[in-house]
Amino acid sequence: MSADISPPDSPRRTRRKEARPAELLEAATCLFVEKGYAATRVEEVAARANVSKGTLFLYYPSKEALLKAVVRENIAGRFVEWSNELRDFAGSTPDLVRYAFAVWVERIAHTHAGGIYKLMTSECCNFPELATFYLEEVIKPGHDLVRRILQRGIERGEFRPIDVNAGIHLIMTPMFSYIQWRHSMGVCYPDSLGISAQAYFDMHLDNLLRGLAAHPQ
Amino acid sequence: MSADISPPDSPRRTRRKEARPAELLEAATCLFVEKGYAATRVEEVAARANVSKGTLFLYYPSKEALLKAVVRENIAGRFVEWSNELRDFAGSTPDLVRYAFAVWVERIAHTHAGGIYKLMTSECCNFPELATFYLEEVIKPGHDLVRRILQRGIERGEFRPIDVNAGIHLIMTPMFSYIQWRHSMGVCYPDSLGISAQAYFDMHLDNLLRGLAAHPQ
Amino acid sequence: MSADISPPDSPRRTRRKEARPAELLEAATCLFVEKGYAATRVEEVAARANVSKGTLFLYYPSKEALLKAVVRENIAGRFVEWSNELRDFAGSTPDLVRYAFAVWVERIAHTHAGGIYKLMTSECCNFPELATFYLEEVIKPGHDLVRRILQRGIERGEFRPIDVNAGIHLIMTPMFSYIQWRHSMGVCYPDSLGISAQAYFDMHLDNLLRGLAAHPQ
Amino acid sequence: MSADISPPDSPRRTRRKEARPAELLEAATCLFVEKGYAATRVEEVAARANVSKGTLFLYYPSKEALLKAVVRENIAGRFVEWSNELRDFAGSTPDLVRYAFAVWVERIAHTHAGGIYKLMTSECCNFPELATFYLEEVIKPGHDLVRRILQRGIERGEFRPIDVNAGIHLIMTPMFSYIQWRHSMGVCYPDSLGISAQAYFDMHLDNLLRGLAAHPQ
DNA sequence: GATGAATGAGTCTTCATTCAT
DNA sequence: AATGAATGAAGACTCATTCAT
């Protein structure tokens, strides 16, 4: 097992072995998001990861374990990083909100993380552990981040005083709604939003910030 | 109740027979929304409707047909009625928006119609006909309605001039987002919204109308 | 469900339904005994019972449940009946032993009950519940019965005084050994005993009773 | 131990290599006896022998070949040796029988050979070659040995004249029965014999020899 | 019309066996 | 020689659908 007994595994073989879990996760994420957990066959996941059915079970002991891994792995704790970005942000709070939206669109809405959110809303009733995990690891940290943004705006006199716990949803709602559309109707009818994603977010941002403004012009 | 005791087509039997499709639909709606299409067994649907598995297939030729019927039947064209309500509304457009939200919460969010929306977002990738149908029969009429509200506000000088096709989403987003939460995380963690549904909608309405106001105070 | 609502199930259908469990048990007993539990496929059991794979699972929830049912059902508590026979036996104790052997060969060794014994010895390490059940329900009652026979013989002065708990095995051993042979080597090589079953038991009985006799001639 | 430190064919390596088959056989014997052939995974066998799954197949081409080897190897023809012991035995035939039992308990019942017998009875229906082999190589030589003991006793006037082909079983039965118990119920319930192994064999020997005695006292 | 027993295609999962390293 | 990653055929079990009654 140790390097001085057997030669190191051949690079290629080893690289594959180490890459497998991520490849399987990638495949599973796409399929679970697209077709739902129940409608996805493990064989499809394996095929998409270019391995056989049996190989999948070498890395994940069951389909359910795969689902949990999908949710768990795609949530690499980004919140610490974002929290630091937020703390260091120098501009106005409206600009911070605009920046946050831009970052979020880029890093969540248009990556797997968005699909995971869709997956979680679809499957959390059948797998309550998923709900618990997602709530603690994603939703709550996310809310905390947004709450701090709102508080910053209020403290600096940029935003009118509001109940920040309610205000959180002003920010979150456009994001979540977009993701849901993107992974449902948007798959079948990419134009069904009626406008571009850019226009969608611009409109929301604009109106949101007007509504929040302490001193409307 | 056996055939040799009561006359054929006894009222009760007839009533049962005519009620079957609706009872099955009701049962299927709840289960499809709660567990997803794939994870729901037709036998469960039948049991919840108090009929046998075989009977279900007398009324719906397949599970997929049942799904389609669930979506179709729960969308009794309410839009004509709402359109009339809108035309006849006498108050200010902000009040109309508030009224629309109230009506919508009552008639959609807290009825099966909301569940159907959740169901559609979950399953429309697997059943594209569902997406087509829903888009044409629900989304587009809904957008039309909302568009007219916005146009009314702009024409009457109550709302600032905006791209109404984008503005539609300002109204829709809080609604859809609430429904998604209610049928996913909200099932497992009813307090995870952090605030009451009332506060959720009040906050959204308030900020939305502030942002839209032609003459901010 | 009750007779006055629906007509009684058609006789043929009902008869099948009621017969299924026994037919499946019969099939499973033969196959489990012959091939072992693990090597027997449920589909084989179903085929031998002239039903499809799915039908088996309507009656037994799993292969393991089927195994347990096989053991459980084939042990209809015959011990009470035998106990009464023993109590009422009028002849000498040697004759009683001879009678017991004859009864046992007929009712156990040459019926499924013998196969169940073989099955239990093969599988009890993998299914400890089986061992527990068999020990309590079969072995112990069987030992009790044999113990009483020995005590009768000793009390009546027909058998020399021995430790009856050890003596039990004098009686049991030829029986169990015969069953093991019959369901293993005897299947492949029916002549490998070298003598007839009759001769086998006669020899054992004769020597056994000679050895036990209080007054050897 | 790596190749670049010790010379090729280092003694230890060689010794390991030569020991492999025996180690695998030892592991396989234990597991096959304990769990049955079908329920034992080759990976378990390999693990117990401290080699990898692949290595097992270097020494035995298939699981079935391993089974056959297990039976074959554990039966190192001991019969010639025993036959000589028998020929040279100087005491009375009852003493010879007592001696044979003692030897047998020590060398068969309490070694792997006993497990092999249990294994053969469990699997011989699925692997008829096993039955053939065992019958020829073990059962028949064993019967010959026992037959000669009985003949010795009869010829010397110590035993009453009996059909020796039937009489063989008088000797064999207690042995085989004990093994079966030891590897089935005895594993789960070590006290279920009710008495010690010593008492079990003493009782059998005593009664057996009483029954066989030419001149009962 | 209603039933529910029966079916068998389909799915997850296991494991003997192979083979590149 | 040894490894263990990979395979895929096979098996337990599910469930939408059929159909005799």
Image (cartoon, coloured by chain):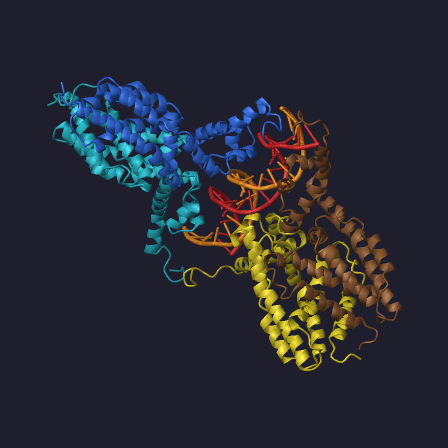
Chain colours: A blue, B cyan, C yellow, D brown, E orange, F red
For the residue pair D141 and B16, the one nearer the viewer reads as D141
Is D161 left or right of B154, judged from the image as shown?
right
Res. A213 image quadrant: top left
Q: x%, y% of residue B73? A: 33, 39
Res. B128 image quadrant: top left
For the residue pair C27 and C129, the one nearer the viewer reads as C129
Q: x%, y% of residue C46? A: 60, 51
Q: x%, y% of residue B107? A: 24, 38
- Residue found 69% across the figure and 36% down from its top: D57
Image label count: 0
Is A50 left or right of A189, judged from the image as shown?
right
Res. C116 image quadrant: bottom right
The quadrant the C terminus of chain D occupies is bottom right
Q: Is residue B56 above or below residue A211?
A: below
For residue B126, say whether it is visible.
no
For the residue pair D107 and C157, the one nearer the viewer reads as D107
In the image, farthest residue toward the left: B217
- Residue found 82% across the figure and 55% down from its top: D82
